[in-house]
Structures are given as structure tokens and as C-alpha cells.
């Protein structure tokens, strides 16, 4: 029924909120301010309690997470095509929240590194199986809205991670980790206890007596299908480039604001939480809703909306990076950039889902996430090298580096999304009727 499909989407949304909250909580717990002679420093700051250096923190937030995340994601994508997805998501959610609980008990860098790698391993279970389930719960014309609603959990989770900086000053950074992990663990238990595995649209059809059963795809054959489909390859490439822009914003705008607007550090922490949570959430929801309406009359809407979002984001990221007024930069620049540019992911996922044969959907989504994470991390590294090599440590130049990086990736990815829209659809397996449909 429609109620059950939406209930399942709501649970997957809460899982994704937990995913993003627990992933980015360390960024804000590390940023908690303290005095070296403050007796409460170890209580409120993970940096003080675990004696972390900047290099160690960089490893924890970078390859200390992605090393397990990107590799495991490929295996979990294949598992999402062949195994019970509800169980995959539940297991992954429990793993990453147990790891977060362990982080709250850590006392040094090595312990945190092991647990962050474990957290990345668990989080790799989630997205391929979640998007695969959504594709089986909703028909193609409703997937942009469903995908957009699910993707909005990224911004709510990011906002909760930002608020965790303030929570840590009240109950301590360890208890903040425990609160986040309890929330995620409870959501996993509810998902496992109340939701059934949706019927796959690519479920094998029983053949008449004497006919051969449909042959199962090997992993190698699945990869051949994914990379042999030109539209899918272009969509994965365009998304990877778009993620590079997102990594530039997430990784270096905080430093830009700290360097350029150093008198607004405290205000920035809370205003940024509002910008990310509210702006990103509204954009994600609106992008899915608009696409679901538009696709009725324009079948290419799933491609056009991501391209339009990238183009609309360009003038606002320019205001964000170049304005000399803090509030103009944040509210007229960054907030509006989030409001128009973050509409892209739900429609994009619908385009990717529709372009992939149902039997390789989970693996295809994993390949996209692997590529996006790899190239996004590469962008972070490249900006760091660019800054260290050309700017002589001057914080004033970081705004120009971020601007050029974002404009270049946004414009290139917009062209990629449009290019994908010009390629004729290749035949894919017929999909059976999803749980939620407008048909009787």
C-alpha cells in the first residue's frame, strides 16, 4: 500500500540521518573551543581528550574513513542485488553505531582510527541497499520525489552534527557520541522489526515446464553491463565531478570563513548549521517534487533539473566567496547556493535507476558512490596542494581557489547531465509493479 511504502521511506530517511550525523560528528567535536588550562577541556573536546594533531584529524576525516567505505561499498552494492536488503541496512547501521559508541570511549588517535575505519565499513552497507529498496517501493514517475526525500536526510544529519558542537559543551563529547549512537541503533531495530523486504522488480519469473530458468548474472557480467551502457557511464562521470564541487565547499569553506571573517567564528558555526540543514533539506525536497511533476510532460526532467541546479548555483557561490560582508556571503551567497544547487541528487538518482537494468542497480549505485568519493577526496587533496604551493599560507586566497574549483566542476557536470539526456535509452528489463502506484 501507499502507506507502507511511505512508512518504509520514512525509516530509510531516519537511517540516513543517523548515517550522516555519525559520519560528520567528529568534525564538530574537534572544533569545540577550549583553553589549554581549562579543567573541562578533556570533557568537552575530543581534540584535547585524545591529544589529536591537525594531521591526525585530517586522516580521521579523510582516508581514515573512506579507505573502508569505498571498497566495502562495491561488495555491498553487489549484495544489494542478490541478498536481503533490509538485513544489510540493519547490520550496517548497528555496526557504525557500535563503532561510534566505541569512539566515545576512546582515549587516543589509534583507537579513534580503528573505530573510524569500522564506521566507514558499516556505512558502506546503507546507500546501495536503500536506493534499491526505494526503486522497488515507488514507480519511476514517483522516484524523484522519493529519492529527494531520502537524500534530504543528508542535510538534517549534517545539521545535527553541527549542533553536536553545542551539545558537547553541555553533556561532554563522549555522551554526545553515545546519544547519536543510541538514536541510530534504535532506528535500526525499528527497521528490522517492522519492515519487510520489498518484492524485487527484477524477481525471476517462473518459466513453463521445459523452459530454462533465467541465468544469474556474475559480478563480472554485472560490471560489463554497467560500464557498457554509455548513458550510465556519463551519469557516473557527471555525478563524480559534481561531488568534487561539493567536497570543495564542505572541506574548505569553513577555513575560508575562519580566515576571512575571523570575528564571526561562533556565529558561523550556528548559522552554517541552519544553512546546511534548512537550505539543503528544502532544495532536496523541492527538486524531487518539481521533477516528479515535470517528468509527466518532459521525460528528460531527471537530467535537466540536476543541470539547471548546477547552473543556478554558480552566481550564488560567487557571491559567497567574493562578498566582503559576512552576512551577505552566508545568506545571499551560501544559503541561496544550497537552496538552488542541492536539488540535483534525487532526480539524478532516478535517472541512474532508470538507466540501470534492475538486476545490477545496487552495484551500479555503489560504483557511482565509489567514483564520487574517490574523485571528491582527490579534489580535497588537490585544493590543499594548490593552496600550499601557490598562496604562501595566505588565507585570503582560499576564497578564489574554492570559487574556481566549484565553478569549474558545476559547469562541467551540468554539461555532463545534459549530454546524458541526449542519449537514447537502452532497453532494460521490464519492471514489475511497485508497492506504491497510481494504478488500481
Image: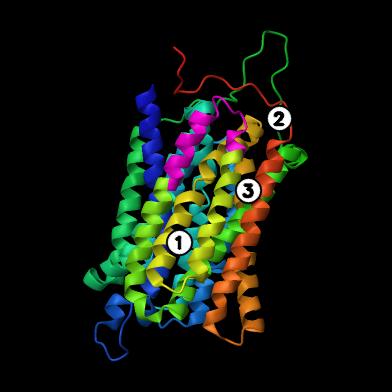
- Which quadrant of the figure has residue 35? bottom left
Kindly indicate whether the residue at mark 3 contacts the one at mark 2 (C-beta within 8 angstroms): no
Relative height, residue 68 to residue 89 (above, below): below
Instruction: Give the mark nearest the N terminus, 1 or 3.
Output: 1
> Can you see residue 191?
yes
- Within 10 Å of the Cα at label 2, are there few (<14), some (14-19), or many (20+) other Cα atoms? some
| Total number of numbered discs in the rendering | 3
Kindly indicate whether the residue at mark 3 contacts the one at mark 1 (C-beta within 8 angstroms): no
Q: CA distance from mark 2 to mark 1?
A: 36 Å
Relative height, residue 381 to residue 192 (above, below): below
Residue sitting at x 38%, y 21%: 1
Q: Which quadrant of the rendered structure holds the C terminus?
A: top left
Location of mark 1 (residue)? 334
Nearest-to-viewer mark from 2 and 1 = 1
Q: CA distance from mark 1 to mark 3?
A: 26 Å
Magenta region: 283-303
Which residue occupies the foreground of this view, 5 or 212?
5
Q: Where residue 376 sits: x, y (%)?
A: 60, 61
Location of mark 2 (residue)? 425
* Residue furthest out toward the top: 209
Query: Would you say residue 286 sits in the magenta stretch?
Result: yes
Location of mark 3 (residue)? 368
Q: Where residue 387 sits: x, y (%)?
A: 61, 79
Q: Where residue 95 sits: x, y (%)?
A: 43, 54
Instruction: Give the mark nearest the N terminus, 2 or 3.
Output: 3
- Left or right, 166 with reference to 29: left
- Left or right, 85 with reference to 205: left
Which residue occupies the foreground of this view, 93 or 8?
8
From the image, give the main secondary structure of the stretch colored magenta: helix
Nearest-to-viewer mark from 2 and 3 = 2
Residue sitting at x 61%, y 87%: 392
Residue sitting at x 55%, y 85%: 394
Amino acid at each position: 500500500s501507499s502507506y507502507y511504502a511511505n512508512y518504509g521511506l520514512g525509516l530509510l530517511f531516519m537511517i540516513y540521518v543517523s548515517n550522516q550525523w555519525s559520519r560528520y560528528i567528529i568534525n564538530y567535536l574537534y572544533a569545540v573551543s577550549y583553553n589549554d588550562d581549562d579543567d573541562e577541556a578533556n570533557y568537552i573536546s575530543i581534540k584535547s581528550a585524545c591529544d589529536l594533531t591537525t594531521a591526525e584529524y585530517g586522516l580521521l576525516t579523510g582516508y581514515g574513513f573512506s579507505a573502508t567505505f569505498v571498497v566495502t561499498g562495491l561488495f555491498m552494492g553487489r549484495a544489494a542485488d542478490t541478498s536481503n536488503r533490509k538485513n544489510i541496512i540493519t547490520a550496517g547501521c548497528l555496526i557504525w553505531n557500535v563503532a561510534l559508541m566505541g569512539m566515545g570511549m576512546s582515549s587516543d588517535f589509534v583507537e579513534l582510527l580503528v573505530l573510524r575505519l569500522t564506521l566507514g565499513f558499516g556505512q558502506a552497507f546503507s546507500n546501495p541497499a536503500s536506493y534499491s529498496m526505494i526503486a522497488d517501493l515507488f514507480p519511476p514517475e514517483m522516484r524523484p520525489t522519493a529519492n529527494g526525500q531520502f537524500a534530504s536526510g543528508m542535510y538534517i544529519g549534517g545539521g545535527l552534527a553541527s549542533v553536536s558542537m553545542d551539545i558537547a559543551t553541555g553533556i561532554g563529547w563522549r555522551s554526545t557520541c553515545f546519544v547519536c549512537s543510541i538514536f541510530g541503533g534504535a532506528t535500526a531495530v525499528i527497521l528490522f522489526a517492522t519492515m519487510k523486504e520489498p518484492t524485487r522488480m527484477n524477481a525471476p519469473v517462473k518459466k513453463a515446464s521445459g523452459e530454462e530458468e533465467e541465468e544469474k548474472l556474475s559480478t563480472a557480467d554485472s560490471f560489463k553491463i554497467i560500464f557498457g551502457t554509455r548513458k550510465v557511464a556519463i551519469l557516473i562521470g557527471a555525478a563524480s565531478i559534481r561531488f568534487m564541487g561539493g567536497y570543495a565547499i564542505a572541506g574548505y569553506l569553513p577555513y575560508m570563513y575562519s580566515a576571512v571573517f575571523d570575528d564571526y567564528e561562533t556565529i558561523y558555526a550556528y548559522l552554517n548549521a541552519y544553512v546546511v540543514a534548512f537550505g539543503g533539506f528544502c532544495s532536496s525536497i523541492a527538486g524531487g517534487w518539481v521533477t516528479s511533476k515535470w517528468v509527466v510532460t518532459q521525460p528528460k526532467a531527471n537530467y535537466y533539473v540536476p543541470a539547471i541546479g548546477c547552473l543556478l548555483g554558480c552566481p550564488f557561490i560567487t557571491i559567497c566567496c567574493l562578498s566582503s560582508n559576512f552576512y551577505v556571503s552566508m545568506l545571499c551567497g551560501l544559503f541561496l547556493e544550497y537552496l538552488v544547487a542541492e536539488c540535483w541528487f534525487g532526480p539524478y538518482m532516478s535517472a541512474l535507476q532508470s538507466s540501470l537494468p534492475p538486476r545490477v542497480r545496487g552495484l551500479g549505485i555503489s560504483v557511482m558512490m565509489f567514483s564520487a568519493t574517490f574523485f571528491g577526496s582527490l579534489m580535497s587533496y588537490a585544493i590543499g596542494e594548490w593552496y600550499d604551493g601557490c598562496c604562501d599560507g595566505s588565507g585570503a586566497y582560499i576564497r578564489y581557489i574554492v570559487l574556481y574549483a566549484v565553478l569549474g566542476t558545476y559547469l562541467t557536470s551540468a554539461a555532463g547531465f545534459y549530454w546524458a539526456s541526449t542519449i537514447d535509452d537502452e532497453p532494460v528489463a521490464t519492471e514489475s509493479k511497485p508497492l506504491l502506484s497510481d494504478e488500481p
